[in-house]
């Protein structure tokens, strides 16, 4: 007789996982379980439900470009991808240590996918992540200086555990963009991790920044404590296109 009010009270307390588990116990019956065992199942379901909600929120806020996962990474395509290193990165120890990660390689070698897969793994382990295209983020930061949002935006970016900067070096930054890039990386230095994805080899970054003083300061905060993945080989897109062409058309 008291079951319905109990369910309503659990829901009113926002114990939705516990309410769902209690409802299932009522439907399936659990007479062979002790009170302590039934309670443990209720609590376990509530914890699982809350963790899943937090993960969903972290993934939504990350705005990852690809729905990528560590389990779906292609190791068959020859592109100098070290499985042992990826396994180590998947533990997210580099995030705990506030280290950076640099992924470089030609277009189509799967750099952004790998970055998103590692970010998704970070979200699964409780870290926050955010994907940004580098030139767009720099422009957003420059604009925010003029409308009063800059410090708030910089604070949010600094608190993100892993910030993905995709297409690094695709465009040469302006003087204002170099300045906000330095300020961003300086704020994040040894506080959080930055994952940089770039077609441009690291040895060309200095010239791309086009300012000796700021280039030294920026790269000093990125490179010396960074792991590196240097991908090589042909484009994965080219391989997929070739496979598609090999499929006979229907007559």
Image (tube, rainbow, N blue to C red):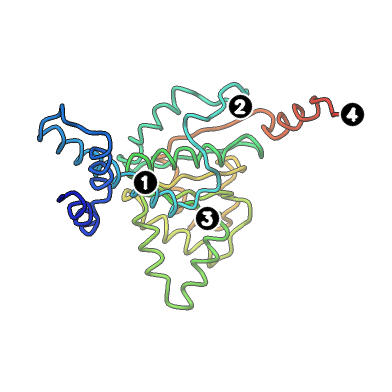
**Residue position for label 3:** 212
Q: Disc 2 versus disc 1: distance between alpha carbons?
A: 31 Å
Ranked by sequence position, the earlier of labels 2 and 1 is 1
Instruction: Tell me the CA gap for discs 3 and 4.
Output: 62 Å
Farthest front residue in view: 1
Foreground label between 3 and 4: 4
Crowding at dot 4, Cα within 10 Å, few <14 / some 14-19 / many 20+, comes out as few
Q: Are marks 3 and 4 in contact (CB under 8 Å)?
A: no
Q: Give the mark nearest the N terminus, 1 or 4.
A: 1
Which quarter of the picture shows residue 113?
top right
- 195 horizontally vs 52: left or right: right
Q: Residue at x 41, y 38 (%)?
A: 121
Where residue 23 appears, as percent x and y from the top left, is: 26, 43
Helix, strand or loop under label 1: helix
Q: What residue is drawn where x is 50% and y is 40%? A: 115
Report the mark closest to the observer, 2 or 4: 4
Residue where numbered disc 1 is placed: 55
In the picture provided, is 211 more to the left or to the right than 97?
A: right
- Residue reaching furthest right? 251
Can you tell which mark lies on residue 173? none
**Upstream in sequence: badge 2 or badge 4:** 2
Secondary structure under badge 4? loop
Disc 1 crowd, CA 10 A, few/some/many (<14, 14-19, 20+): some
List the residue tagged with mark 4.
251
Numbered mark located on residue 79 in the image: 2
Q: Nearer the viewer, residue 48 or 224?
A: 48
From this view, report whether residue 166 is shown above or below residue 90: below
Residue at mark 1 to residue at mark 4: CA–CA distance: 47 Å
Could you tell me how far apart the alpha carbons at marks 2 and 3 are, in whole angstroms? Answer: 33 Å
Q: x%, y% of residue 238?
A: 73, 32
N-terminal of the two: label 2 or label 3?
A: 2
Q: Residues within 10 Å of mark 3 (few under 14, many from 20)?
A: few
């Amino acid at each position: 007789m008291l079951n319905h009010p109990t369910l309503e009270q659990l829901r009113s307390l926002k114990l939705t996982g516990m309410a769902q588990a209690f409802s299932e116990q009522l439907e399936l019956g659990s007479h062979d379980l002790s009170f302590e065992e039934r309670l443990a199942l209720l609590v376990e379901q509530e914890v699982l439900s809350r963790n899943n909600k937090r993960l969903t929120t972290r993934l939504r806020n990350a705005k990852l470009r690809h729905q990528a996962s560590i389990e779906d990474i292609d190791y068959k395509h020859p592109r100098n991808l070290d499985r042992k290193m990826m396994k180590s990165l998947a533990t997210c120890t580099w995030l705990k240590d506030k280290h950076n990660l640099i992924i470089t390689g030609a277009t189509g070698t799967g750099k952004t996918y790998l970055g998103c897969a590692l970010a998704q793994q970070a979200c699964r382990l409780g870290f926050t992540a955010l994907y940004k295209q580098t030139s767009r983020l720099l422009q957003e930061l420059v604009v925010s200086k003029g409308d009063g949002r800059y410090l708030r935006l910089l604070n949010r970016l600094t608190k993100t555990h892993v910030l993905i900067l995709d297409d690094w070096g695709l465009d040469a930054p302006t003087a204002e963009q170099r300045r906000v890039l330095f300020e961003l990386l300086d704020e994040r230095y040894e506080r959080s991790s930055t994952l940089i994805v770039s077609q441009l080899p690291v040895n060309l970054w200095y010239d791309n920044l086009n300012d000796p003083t700021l280039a030294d300061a920026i790269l000093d905060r990125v490179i010396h404590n960074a792991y590196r993945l240097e991908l090589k080989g042909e484009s994965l897109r080219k391989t997929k296109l070739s496979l598609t062409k090999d499929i006979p058309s229907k007559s």
